[in-house]
Each structure stands twice: as C-alpha cells, then as structure tokens.
Amino acid sequence: MKYNIITVILLTFFSWNARAQITPQEQYDQLQRGLAAGWNTWDTRSVLTQVLMPYGAAIDLNLSDAEGDRINTFRIGGSPLMHPGHHSYDGSYTDVSLEWKGQRLRVQSASDGLKNFILVTPLEGNKDGGQLHIVPKSLWMRANKIVLDNDQFSIAPYGFDIKLQVTTRGEFRKADDQEIVMSVNQPVAICCGEEKTIEEVQDFIEKKAEAFVVGTRDKYGECYEEYNAMQSVLAWDNIFDPSIRKVITPVSRNWNVRWSHHPEFGGFVLFCWDTYFAGMMLAADNKELAYANVVEITNSVTEKGFVPNFYTGNDLKSRDRSQPPVGSLAVWSIYKKYQEKWFLELLYDKLLQWNRWWDKNRNIDGLLCWGSSPFEKVTYHARESGGINELYAAGLESGLDNSPMYDNIKFDKEKHMMLLNDVGLSSLYVMDCDYLAAIADELGYEKDAKELRSRGEVYRQKMSMMWDDEKGLYYNRHTDTGLLDPRTSPTNFYPLLARAPSKEQASKMIQEHLLNPDEFWGKWVIPATPRNDPAFKDNNYWRGRIWAPLNFLVYLGLKNYDFEDVRISLAEKSKNLLLKGWMSDGFVFENYNSTNGQGDDTPRSDKFYYWGALLSYIGLMEQGYVLPPELPHSK
C-alpha cells in the first residue's frame, strides 16, 4: 500500500498526538503491567516459589527430612536460616543457600522469557535423606490447568495460547496428582519450557550468573559490594501483591506476613519514609521499580490529605498519623535522574496536600509537633484503634517509635499533639517545602512555588527559637513552658537539611556534638541516642542503636555545608557497618548495635530490611555513582 506525503504527515501527527494524550495515570498503569511480567520470586510467602506473571502459574519448592517433617515457606531473615546471593530485579537470575535440619542446599534459577531453569545443589555437609517437593500451583485465583505425569507436568493458563512443559532431572522418588518428590542427595534440575540435562542447566545458570555479576562489577568497581548489598536486599524484597494487583517493594517479607489478613495471599505493608527511601535507592538503576514504590506510597494518601505511617491490604492505613515528610526529597531525587515530568504531574497534588496538612494540623507556636489525630473508622480493624490520640502513636508518627526523646512528654488530647516542637520534624518540613517548590517550578506552578518558599522561610526563621548558642545545638522545645529539652538524637542535626544554621552555628553543631565521642562519634555511628544518655545502654530499637536513615539524612545535611572531611568519614563508617554483616552472612539489618556493630544481637532487628542499605547508598553517593538530590537556585 502506498501513501502520499499528506497522508504520511497526518498519520505521523495523529500517532504523536495519541501518545501525547496518554495521561500520567495511564503511563503509570502501563509501567505496572510491564513490571508484573515474567518469572520471579513474586510470592511474599516464600523465596523458593517461582511465579510466572501475569498468569499466576507457580513452581513451589518444599523440603522434607527423613523423619517426615516438612517446610513450605522460606523467607530471608526467618527460619530456616537462609543466605541470600544475587537476585536480578527482573528475576532472570536468583541464588540463595539454606540450612534446615541438616540439609544444606543452594537454589539457583535462570529464566529467559517463558523458559525457566531451577537448580538445587547439595552443599558440603548436606545430610542424606532429604527430599525436594516440587509443587505446581495456580496462585491468587488465577486459572491454570495443571497436569502431572510421573516426573513431569504441564501448566496451561486458561484463555492464553500457552502450555508450559516442565521436566525434572535428578534422583526421582515418587509423584502423585499434587507434586513430584526428588532426592536432594544429588543435584536436581527443573526445566520449564525446554528440556535440558543437568549439565546443560548448570551451564545455562553459570552464564546468567557471570553476565549479571560482571556487568555490576564493571559498573561499580571498588564499590561493588556496597551496591551488591543494596541491590540484593531490594530485589529479594520485591513482590507482586494480588490484593492491590501491583508490584511493590515492602521493607521485608517477614513484615509482610506479620501484617497479612489472608495468609494464602501473603500480604504486604508499606511504611511511609521507608518506601520513599527505597524509591531513591532503586532509582540507581531501575526506574520502573523506583516509580512504582514512590507512586504506591503517595497514592495511599488518607482522606485528610496526608501520606500515612503505614498502608496495607483492605485499605487499612494509619489514618491518625503520618511519618517524616521525605516524599518530595525522594520524588525530586528520582526526577533529577530520569527527567520525566509525567512522574511529577502524577504525584504533585498529593505531595502539596500533604505539605499543607502538616502546617494546618501539627503546628504550635509556628513550629511542628508529632501527633495522632482521631478519625472516623473506615475498616474497623484492630490495628486502627491502638494508641490513637495518645503519646504512643505520636511517637510512631516520628518514625523513632520508642526514642527516649519522647519519654514522659506531655500529650494534648485536644490539639492531638505532643507539647514539644520537634527540631527534626520542623527541619524536614522546611526541606520538604524547598524540594516541593522546585517541583512546582518544573511544572510551571509559580503561585504554588511562591507559597511553598514563603512558608518554608517562615519555619526556617522560627527555628531560631530552638537554638542554644551556649551549647551550640538546636533542641526540641516544650510548648507549654518554652524551655528547650536536653535530650537529643541525630535529628538534632537535621537543621542542616533546612539550611537553617549559619556556617558558624553549623560548625559548632558538628565539632561539639556530632564529632564528640561522648555523644555521637566513634567506630560505629551514628547512635539514635547519644552515648552519654542513660537510655543508650538499653540497646533496644531506637534507644541506643544505629539506624541507617538517620545516618543518611545527617549525611545529606552535611552536603549543604563545607564539611567534606566529616562527610567522607561518615560515608566510610557507614559503609564499614553495612559490610560487617553483609560480607559475613549476606544480611542487611534493620538496625545495628552502636558498641560492636552487630545487627543480630537483638530480636528487634530484622535481618533483611532494605533501609539498612542506605548505609551503602551514602557511599555510592559520595563516590559519584548516584546523584545527590541537589536543588536548583531559588527562583
């Protein structure tokens, strides 16, 4: 068929116009559909379940021992003991080792389109008598026809012209209409979509592994292990949740299951500032996952206009409280790398709502306080009622849950706030105004940008009420007495984020407090409670332990001033802390001991919680592998 020049021009115009008419929401929906495709460890319940999306066809691996005990869920940081290896974001290569009742196994997978090959290899010291149960499944009410035939089976998604033939290689034990059972005394290969020998599967997987590792080593050089830890924990925590039909990256699979309403579906929970930090880390080399997580947590905004502390299934969310406002920081950081305005357009209105909410609902004397506000129940779930309009829930809003800074602080049930102007929150809010104003500029919203900068500057000036010149630090302020509170944490350095202190004030803060070994400095830094506070010895969650997000935010604050040596030292110490647990066990801890750098010395530290990787993200930023979230000159 021939076209004249006019027809070609018109076709080109209409094609371009059609693309131009795609809304930001439609672009995001397309992105999510693209993410939820292919083989991956999509099921939050077990990293040994390989799922093919969008069909929900699954190959689930279980183990049993000679005594008949059986296990069917495997999550890193739980039981059994698992040591995570590499995991590409797209699931094309995964590698994990485990120990359970004397069985020591390595499980690898490599996929290419509909083809997937799983290799289970016994490791040195593996106890004889163990069995591998290969269970084909249809997950999440997806329709698949499954037919087992001795040592092989087929999976055919209804409504699609697809039939996956799955064969096994190894020491066959038995089979029935539910599963195939193999011995794990010898290697076992599971071949989906193409038959291969065990040797061919080993070769295929080895080549996939080499390509994955070589590519990242070449890119990150001496920082490879820091990147490897960050990428690995994010990839293993990445799931598909069937209740919201979205690809998301919650903090850890163990947390997901604790929050599950329907164990057969797995469950999920997204926490506010955790998820924004995940988006920043993912943006290092995965735009789609960075967008997905930041969009999902921002879209969870409540009826009152704030992003909640948590969001989980059945529309359950903390409608009484928010969490530290780092959303605009994350969105700006991601935008600076990928430069796609539709991403800003999709989120801007909700971020602006959230920003205005803080000013209207958490303001006393022109500065902000943490709080918890009563609300009309929506889901009537038990988690909706605990501690609301009380000091406990206000502490949860801070993100520093049981910090001694909030011990015995008065809580006003009429105002729904602690009677404590919080220097950390007020600083983060000024930072949020600055970043959101930059986003408004990008989108051409001049009036909004002016409003945001004006409001941010008012708060920035008000913060002088928190400064103690004699002690050289900003302190929380009691609103009922006007007195400054002597208890501190790394949040007392957040005014650096707001660019509130002068150079001289900032120097006092760093030299007299941050670098003071009696307070915050040392081999392992930065403790959430200063070393000379009696609560430091508690070593319990936010009382005395090190938390990666605090290090990260202080690091960003240092970048606003001329403290290069301190910044480099903090990056180095943060990296060493992360690598201590990563190089020995492959773990990325939720928090760390401030005395010895251990992450698993307390049950209140998840072994595979992704924001621990902010410790390596600091180093990657310092070395120039990821972009700092720099603001343009104010307009």
Image (tube, rainbow, N blue to C red):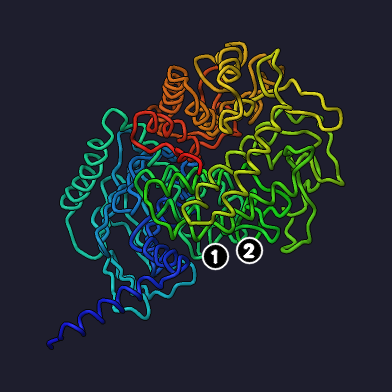
Asked if residue 300 can be seen in this view, the reply is: yes
Q: Is residue 137 left or right of residue 319?
A: left
Say which label, 1 or 2, has the lower sequence index.
Answer: 1
- Give the label on residue 243, or none: 1
User: In the rendered image, which quarter contains the N terminus?
Assistant: bottom left
Could you tell me the amino acid type at mark 1? Ser
- 65 is higher (above) or lower (below) than 57: above
Residue at the far left: name it: 2
Q: Residue at x 60, y 33 (%)?
A: 603
Q: Residue at x 78, y 33 (%)?
A: 420
Residue at the far bottom: name it: 1
Q: Position of residue 470 (x, y in %)?
A: 71, 12
Q: Secondary structure at mark 1?
A: loop
Q: Position of residue 527 (x, y in %)?
A: 59, 23
- 103 is higher (above) or lower (below) than 567: below
**Which class describes the residues within 10 Å of circle 1: few (<14), some (14-19), or many (20+)?**
some
Q: Secondary structure at mark 2?
A: loop
- Foreground pick, 140 / 411: 411
Q: Residue at x 43, y 31 (%)?
A: 618
Q: Quadrant of residue 112?
A: bottom left
Q: Position of residue 125 (x, y in %)?
A: 33, 33
- Give the label on residue 314, or none: 2
Say whether marks 1 and 2 touch (CB < 8 Å).
yes
Q: Is residue 508 left or right of residue 617?
A: right
Asked if residue 251 can be seen in this view, the reply is: no
- Foreground pick, 192 / 360: 360
Could you tell me the amino acid type at mark 2? Asn
